[in-house]
């Protein structure tokens, strides 16, 4: 029998629902849902979306927690021919409004408990036509809301998926930008299907795997756990978060989890729990880390918790999902390295003037491959900064603007970032965005935000502020004000109140001087 390659992100669901209809596709907070159920509900919601005006290429925002409706929504949008954007449920009103307006979202799929955030936004948006809400519908006379379950029950399964091709947009993944406003990374079905397949290959995954996901599906590292599981015909064990580790541990054991993806903050919590009461998960065969470097000491301790697991160090960025990985067998032989390019791609280092960099010297990392983004949504100016002329006529390669070294064996070592973006807990934080919030707090005259090295977070958000004369704000009050307007990961870990901030000769706040003061 001829097996057609999976060209589209939802092909895996179609194939595996036919092949393994009764197999659990997703276990959400302990409750299993089969491939057959996922396809049936996704097709029903896809019909509902098309009946409400969704056309091929229209954007659909998914503003939900890690829940069953969120998983159904992701595949329904793809089957209906739409472009999904999964928005972090921690996102506050200002950013949510910007994202929905920027992408011209036609439909919003959301959770009722987030109404306090989205209702004020929707009153001001004119292009959004439909809001479908899971859970309890909030009382609101200002906007029309439809119940998620009603939309499913009143719709028959879509008879034929939309005529999507691999070059069509599959997703916009919004990531923080240096201007303070997030940028929508444009990824096609081809780029995302390729990336998922490459990850599956080097992680050596199989359909027998049971992959844990405690990361937000709005975070591309979390989203790809779902995409890989469905492409393989494996099972995703989905949790809302890692807030309650003991509960996660119970479900890991009950579901025989074999793949544990994490970021250093999660591993820090895991090791802290292990120090109190020894843990052991012998069924886990793969442990993966990204977002920030995994300290070598963590690796030794993780081997105690996961005695049978291969441990992967990796590096990536939203603009191409993943750049490189270190073979787990080399983790001791190549300390500090993030490895080589993922299968099917190529990486190289260039100097600031575009010349090749010899082994051992620092250069700017460039990436070639089918996983590279098309560009930033509506931002050709920023796209041109990241996508450069490649080796072949007409080719565009991704310039990461991050500095690396490459040894004589071709292994990469991260040196540092070349922009102001802070990468913390696996998320990108724009200092400008945090500064804008700080400036909006009555009593603050000046503010500057930088990233400082942190063993667990990769970088921690650090805010320097100068108060107005007579103001009596405390660090606690400033942090509370930030919490009201920023996602948790964006809230400064350190808030330092000073009488003055260093300035350049042109009168600008010198972040370079602030970083130097932190390193002293």
Image (tube, rainbow, N blue to C red):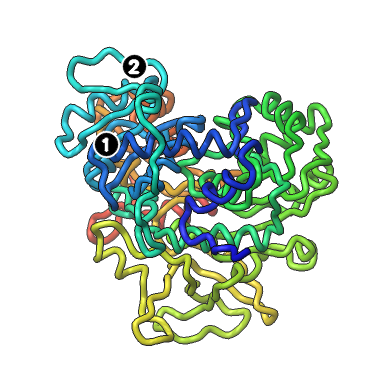
Instruction: Residue 114 in the image: state x and y as whole percent.
Output: 37, 24
The earlier-in-sequence mark between 1 and 2 is 1
Disc 1/disc 2 C-alpha distance (Å): 21 Å
Q: Which residue is mark 2?
A: 137
Q: Is residue 281 visible?
A: yes
Q: Residue at x 73, y 50 (%)?
A: 286
Label 1 crowd bin: few (<14), some (14–19), many (20+), radius 10 Å: few
Nearer the observer: mark 1 or 2; the answer is 1
Q: Residue 451 versus residue 123: which sits nearer the camera?
A: 123
Residue 511 versus residue 418 in the image, above or below: above
Q: Which residue is mark 1?
A: 51
Which label was assigned to residue 391? Answer: none
SS at mark 1 in the image = helix
Quarter occupied by the N terminus: bottom right
Q: Is residue 175 visible?
A: no
The quarter holding residue 133 reads top left
Q: Residue furthest top?
A: 139
Q: Residue at x 52, y 63 (%)?
A: 194
Instruction: Residue 399 in the image: state x and y as whole percent.
Output: 42, 71
Q: Residue at x 39, y 50 (%)?
A: 173
Q: Residue at x 50, y 30 (%)?
A: 67
Instruction: Residue 175 in the image: state x and y as whole percent.
Output: 39, 50
């Amino acid at each position: 029998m001829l097996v057609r390659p999976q060209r589209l992100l939802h092909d895996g669901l179609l194939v595996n629902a036919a092949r393994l209809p009764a197999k659990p596709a997703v276990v959400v907070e302990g409750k299993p849902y089969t491939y057959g159920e996922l396809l049936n509900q996704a097709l029903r919601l896809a019909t509902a979306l098309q009946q409400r005006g969704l056309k091929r290429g229209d954007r659909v925002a998914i503003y939900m927690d890690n829940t069953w409706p969120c998983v159904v929504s992701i595949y329904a949008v793809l089957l209906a021919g739409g472009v999904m954007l999964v928005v972090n449920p921690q996102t506050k009103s200002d950013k949510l409004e910007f994202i929905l307006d920027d992408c011209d979202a036609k439909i919003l799929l959301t959770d009722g408990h987030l109404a306090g955030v989205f209702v004020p936004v929707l009153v001001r948006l004119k292009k959004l036509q439909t809001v479908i809400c899971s859970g309890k519908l909030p009382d609101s006379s200002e906007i029309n809301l439809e119940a998620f379950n009603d939309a499913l029950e009143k719709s028959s399964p879509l008879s034929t998926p939309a005529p999507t091709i691999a070059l069509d947009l599959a997703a916009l993944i919004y990531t923080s930008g240096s201007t303070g406003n997030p940028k929508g990374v444009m990824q096609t079905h081809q780029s995302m299907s390729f990336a998922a397949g490459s990850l599956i290959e080097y992680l050596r995954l199989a359909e027998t795997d049971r992959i844990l996901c405690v990361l937000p599906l709005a975070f591309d590292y979390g989203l790809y756990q779902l995409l890989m599981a469905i492409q393989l015909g494996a099972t995703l064990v989905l949790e809302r978060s890692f807030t309650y580790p003991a509960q996660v541990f119970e479900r890991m054991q009950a579901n025989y989890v074999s793949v544990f993806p994490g970021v250093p903050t999660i591993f820090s919590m895991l090791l802290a729990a292990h120090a109190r009461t020894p843990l052991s998960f012998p069924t886990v065969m793969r442990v993966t880390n990204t977002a920030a470097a995994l300290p070598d000491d963590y690796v030794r301790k993780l081997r105690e918790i996961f005695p049978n697991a291969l441990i992967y160090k990796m590096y990536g960025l939203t603009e191409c999902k993943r750049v490189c990985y270190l073979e787990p067998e080399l983790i001791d032989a190549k300390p500090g390295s993030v490895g080589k390019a993922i299968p099917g791609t190529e990486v190289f280092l260039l100097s600031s003037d575009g010349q090749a960099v010899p082994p051992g010297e620092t250069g700017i990392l460039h990436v070639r491959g089918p996983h590279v983004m098309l560009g930033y949504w509506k931002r050709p100016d920023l796209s041109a900064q990241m996508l450069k002329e490649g080796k072949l006529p007409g080719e565009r390669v991704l310039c990461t603007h991050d500095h690396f070294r490459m040894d004589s064996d071709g292994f990469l070592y991260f040196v540092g970032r070349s922009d102001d973006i802070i990468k913390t807990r696996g998320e990108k934080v724009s200092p400008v965005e945090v500064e804008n919030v700080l400036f909006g707090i009555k009593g603050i005259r000046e503010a500057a935000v930088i990233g400082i090295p942190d063993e667990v977070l990769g970088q921690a958000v650090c805010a320097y502020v100068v108060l107005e004369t007579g103001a009596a704000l405390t660090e606690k009050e400033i942090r509370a004000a930030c919490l009201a307007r920023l996602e948790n990961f964006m809230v400064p870990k350190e808030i330092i109140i000073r009488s003055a901030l260093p300035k350049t000769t042109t009168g600008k706040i010198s972040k370079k001087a602030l970083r130097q003061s932190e390193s002293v």
